[in-house]
Amino acid sequence: MKVKMTNPCDNCPFRSDIKPFDLRKGRLKGIIQNLMDDDMQTFPCHKTTGLERDEDGFSESEWQHCAGAMAMLYKLGYQNVAMRLAFAFKYITPQQLRTDLVYDSLEDLLRAYEH
């Protein structure tokens, strides 16, 4: 998985400025739990996970770490291994992450997805 994206996509589930992404009940909590409990975990951007090239030109071998997930983790004071390596090798910088577009807390994020 590559770590190049720094701007959450227009319908990223971590964005606070849009209507919540349609996720099945409990899915977001599982994603957050995995990312927070194991710093080896990554979360791919949903726009880069298709087996075929999508409209943005990504293929399976080009899966990208979700920029919204990285921004949210960073905002909360966490960095998974992929992020730490990307920062260390200067693929991206923390300042490039759009933390202004994600929720301020896990509670706010989860509350937005309550059905």
Image: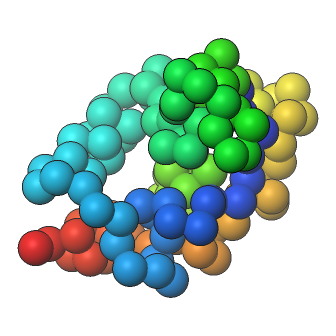
Rendered-image quadrant of the N terminus: top right
Tell me what residue is drawn at x 31 percent, y 42 percent: 31
Tell me what residue is drawn at x 21 percent, y 47 percent: 27
* Extreme residue toward the top, this view: 61
Q: Position of residue 25 (x, y in %)?
A: 11, 55
**How many marks on residues?**
0
Q: Position of residue 115 (x, y in %)?
A: 10, 73
Tell me what residue is drawn at x 56 percent, y 45 percent: 47
Residues 51 and 74: in front is 51
Position of 73 with respect to 7 (left or right) is left
Q: Position of residue 51 (x, y in %)?
A: 53, 22
Position of 82 with respect to 106 (left or right) is right
Asked if residue 80 can be seen in this view, the reply is: no
Asked if residue 13 can be seen in this view, the reply is: yes
Q: Position of residue 110 (x, y in %)?
A: 24, 67
Residues 58 and 107: in front is 58
* Extreme residue toward the right, this view: 90
Tell me what residue is drawn at x 50 percent, y 60 percent: 12
Residues 101 and 54: in front is 54
